[in-house]
Image: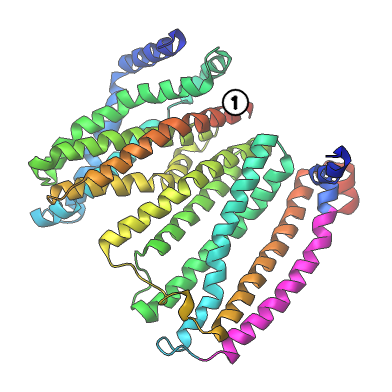
Amino acid sequence: MDRHSWAWFHRFASPPYVYRFAGALAPWCAWTALLLIGFGLYGGLWSSPPDYQQGDGFRIIYIHVPSAYLSMMCYALLALASAVGLVWRIKLAHAVAVAAAPLGASFTFLALVTGSLWGKPMWGTFWVWDARLTSELILLFLYLGFIALNRAYEDPRSGDRAAAVLAVVGVVNLPIIHYSVVWWSSLHQGSTRFFGGEAEIATSMVIPLLLMILGFTMLFGACLLKRMQAEILARERDAAWAAEVA
Amino acid sequence: MSRPLFALMSRDLKLAYRRRDELATPAIFFVLVTTLFPLGLSPQPDLLQSIGPGVVWVAALLAGLIGQQTLFKGDFDDGSLEQLLLCPVSLELLALTRVATHWLTAGLPIVLLSPLMGLLMDYPAHAMGELVLSLLLGTAILSLLGAVGAALTVGLRQSGMLMPILVLPLAVPVLIFGAQAAAQAAGGGDPGAALYLLAAMLVLGITLAPFAIAAAVRVSLES
């Protein structure tokens, strides 16, 4: 393959280029997110009928499911960026991981809170040691550990690499943690099912849910891009280009 | 065993022997934490029987972590860790040797004390072998995991609380399967599945953890 066809890729190792690229892309993500979440909320809260068993209580899934999905996707992204940073020593990859961590922790927390609020009327208690809730809680601890370790180092470069090692160890462990918790909770109590299964959800509920998932992903993208910009500026604060844009 | 590894092992064992009183700390901690549960809950035999395996396991987990915080500290402070990096043997093998030696001096005493703690918690004598076996496998995995945490935090001033925060979430599967094996054996069930899973995790840990420990040591030495 022609060597120059890959030349564009190297620009993503240059902080000023990525800073401008993120700045240009972020508003697009934000507006798409606003549009999708707006339609999703309208479809979810007004135009779809209440569930025949759960009444209006089910509507919390429009926040809960996207948050839970993003909490996991964000950890995958964080681990991938960490691995790229460790292997190829790309500093910007660490900036992506560090920018993503608090977002992932927030979505995990949101998924836990909405799940527990949903659990109160449905299960009669705020907290059940259900497999999914428990692995989500452990995921939150993994995020907090990543953030704490990263901040504990005075030299940000070492903090990046140390937290990246932890993220990679965590992602190897995550499937083991998940299945051990599933096995553990199935021994303690019958597995709790949210619904009968994917096929039983009515179309009028699925479409707003899909819109919300896409909208939340776009929102995550917009926040990540803005956080990356801030992270890059903070890291490059001594560079001439950073003084120009800031 | 190659000579540098043997030298590291005998040096670590010698150092541990010369600081015998420090050796006892994790074991005393293990006994103490186990004792706290009947005091905090209630000494009723049926309650102790149901929580016993879990309590012994949680205490072993915490004691193991406490014992591991200084795994690389001394060598980091006096510069021997950098000399280990210069050693012709790969850092991964050296890390594995260090973990194995440390397990002999800190993990094994906990395993040997566990039947005694089992008796205190009214754990049935016929299942004691399974409790010991589960802890034998489990403490070895925890040593490997803890070493990753210890290596990541060795250069930090506030490593005391940070290291358990990093390692405890990763240790959840070990706790689940270990306590499960012990509880199933006590209830007359077959702990085979849980024990095999622990053994599988130990194999995975021995295979992968040295790379993570070595990477973490390198990061700590660069800072």
Q: Does the magenta-highlighted stretch encompass residue A25?
A: yes
Q: Quadrant of the N terminus of chain A?
A: top right
Front-most of residues B192 and A69: B192
Q: Residue at x 58, y 77 (%)?
A: A209
Magenta span main SS: helix
Q: Residue at x 31, y 56 (%)?
A: A184
Task: Locate residue B97, reporting x and y percent.
Answer: 41, 20
In the image, farthest residue toward the front: A1
Instruction: Look at mark 1 in the image and give the residue it sits on.
Output: B221
At a point 16% along the width and 46% down the height, the residue shown is: B185
Tell me, yes or no, if residue A154 can be seen here: no
Query: Does residue A169 appear anywhere in the picture?
Result: yes
Q: Is residue B117 magenta?
A: no
What range of the chain is rendered magenta?
A: A20-49
Q: Chain of mark 1?
A: B
* x and y, in percent, of residue B28 in the image: 24, 33
